[in-house]
Image: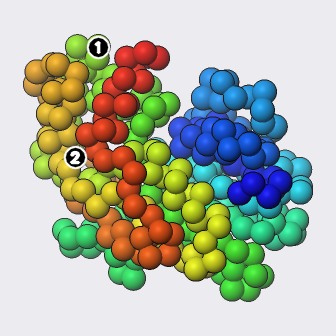
Amino acid sequence: MGKNRLYLVTGGAGFIGSHIVETLVNRGEKVRVLDNLMTGKHENIANFEDRIEFILGDIRDFKALGKAVDGVDTIFHEAAIPSVPRSVEEPQLNHDSNVNGTFNLLLAARDAGVRRVVYAASSSAYGEIGTGEKKEDQLPSPLSPYAVAKLVGEYYCQVFTRVYGLETVSLRYFNVFGPRQDPSSPYSGVISKFVTTLLNGDRPMIFGDGEQSRDFTYVANVVDANIRAAESADAVGEVINLGVNQRTTLNQLLSELQKIIGTNITPQYEPPRAGDIRHSLADISRAEKLLGFKPLIGLEEGLKATVDWYRRNV
Ligand SMILES: NC(=O)c1ccc[n+]([C@@H]2O[C@H](COP(=O)([O-])OP(=O)(O)OC[C@H]3O[C@@H](n4cnc5c(N)ncnc54)[C@H](O)[C@@H]3O)[C@@H](O)[C@H]2O)c1
């Protein structure tokens, strides 16, 4: 950082990407965004759009990528169709965007002499291995087309480091939440859905019995780890969990949110969804060791900030 480098954020108009862009811009860095606005929105970057270069383009399009990577030092690769249920319904779109798109990006980065790619990997790669903490050296066991695709992206990252010397770091995000997460599609993240549903006074929907658990990770933690991953020499070629190491069931999450919002609405329970996993909790010792990462914002503080944002903006 601060070395007059050019940063490319793919998917920079999306939820997580826009937070990375905002932080880089606030640090005075030069930022370019490549996004096809398929799930992202212009309004996510509207407040700092005059300070970035925006390219409307697709990671499936090699020509657009060539333009986007020109002169770039570091890429934060967030562009993807980020949904397990959508990947079950549209496996071709998932494969084209998440496997071919990532492969194209790595190829373009290699050819342009990019220094480093930090890749948004996913905890879904683990599948159902036990109920305990997920560790990076466990054998992955993906249960959905989305999980397969994100895992293939990791393997390509590692191979591009080994074979071509392109520095890569894969961060396996665990259920990220925060301001600007889109609540509007049937594929949206559960916290954005719960918050907006409760604020409307409607009944939230839970797939399954609500006793499935997640390691809900506030987005500021993810931005911090990305920036660390762009610099750390020890992280090159590695796969690193990114969570806060806190287990929360959906039922607990909902009651925490009802407390913050001041509601007491009975949820509606629906059958479990295909491809969903039961428990997901990150061991974050590798992130601590290789990135010097410590969660900055815990669940309660993150939920309060998120509710505040939806109250003001939706
Ligand atoms: N949100 C989570 O909990 C979570 C968990 C694990 C991994 N991830 C990964 O983090 C990344 C960001 O996810 P998000 O939650 O911010 O989702 P998001 O949908 O808000 O952001 C994805 C962005 O990528 C763009 N995009 C999609 N396909 C594209 C394409 N072919 N070409 C160019 N741009 C394209 C979208 O328009 C959007 O702006 C994704 O790679 C996702 O797989 C997210």
> Where residue 219 appears, x then y in whole percent?
45, 45
The residue depicted at 89 percent of the width and 55 percent of the height is 70
- Note whether 69 is above or below 236 in the view shown: above
The label shown at residue 107 is none
Mark 1 residue element: loop
* Dot 1 crowding, Cα within 10 Å, few <14, some 14–19, many 20+: few
Which label lies toward us, 1 or 2? 1
Residue 272's disc is 2
Q: Amino acid at mark 1?
A: Asn
Query: Within the image, what quadrant is residue 191 found in?
Result: top left
Q: Residues within 10 Å of mark 2 (few under 14, many from 20)?
A: some
Residue at 73 percent across and 28 percent down: it is 49
Residue closer to the observer: 91 or 6: 6
Q: Nearer the viewer, residue 289 or 82?
A: 289
Q: Is residue 211 above or below residue 177?
A: below
Q: Secondary structure at mark 2?
A: loop
As displayed, is residue 210 above or below residue 37?
A: below
Apparent side of residue 145 relative to residue 281 in the rendered image (left or right): right
Residue 200 image label: 1
Q: Quadrant of residue 108?
A: bottom right
Give the camera-side residue of 271 and 162: 162
Distance of label 1 from label 2 (alpha carbons): 24 Å
Q: Quadrant of residue 112?
A: bottom right
Tell me the amino acid under the disc marked 2: Pro
N-term-proximal mark, 1 vs 2:
1
Q: Tell whether label 2 touches label 1 (CB within 8 Å).
A: no
Where in the figure is residue 76, as x and y percent of width and height? Answer: 66, 55
Residue 274 visible here: no
Q: Position of residue 142 (x, y in %)?
A: 40, 67
Answer whether residue 260 is visible to the viewer in this image: yes
